Amino acid sequence: MRGQESNVKYLNVPTVFLAGTVYQPKESDEVCIGAKVKLTCKETGEKWETETNYFGDWEVEWLPKNKKIDVEISAAGYKAVTYTAYTDMDHYVDMTYLVNA
C-alpha cells in the first residue's frame, strides 16, 4: 500500500559469492574432493582460500562487489587451473575439469 513502509530488516545477508564444482579428468567422471581453491582480488590483493567438499563443490561468500577475482584450483597430481571471475553478482562459475600433471 502506498505511504506505508516495511518493518522488515535483513541481517547477515552475504554480499556476493562465487562457487563451482571441481572434477577429476573428464574421462573419469568423478568429483575432486579436497582440491585447494584460492581466490585473489586483483584490485585490493585480498585473498580467500577453501577446499572442495565431498561433492566436489566449493563456495566463498562475502566477496567485495564489482571486482575481478583470480581463481586458482589445484590438487595433487593435477595441473593447476586458473581463471578470472567477476563479482558483479553471485556466480556459480561452472564445472572445472582437472588435467593430469
Image: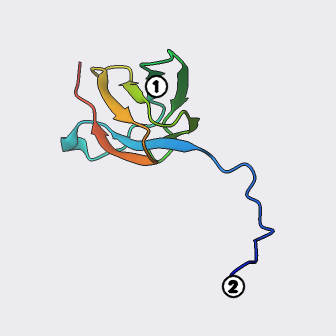
Residue at 41% x, 47% y: name it: 91
Residue type highlighted by circle 1: Leu
Q: Which residue appears farthest toward the left when viewing the image?
A: 27
Which structural element holds mark 1? strand
Quadrant holding the C terminus: top left
Q: Secondary structure at mark 2?
A: loop
Q: Find residue 72 and report its image quarter.
A: top left
Q: Nearer the viewer, residue 28 or 57?
A: 57
- Camera-side residue: 99 or 66? 66
Q: Which color scheme did the rendering employ for the protein?
A: rainbow
> Would you name the residue on which mark 2 appears?
1
Q: Residue at 44% of width from left, 47% of height from top? A: 89
Q: Which residue is mark 1?
A: 39
Q: Between marks 2 and 1, how big is the CA–CA gap? A: 44 Å
In which quadrant is the N terminus drawn?
A: bottom right
Residue 18 tag number: none
Q: Is residue 56 above or below residue 3?
A: above
Amino acid at circle 2: Met
Q: Are marks 2 and 1 in contact (CB under 8 Å)?
A: no
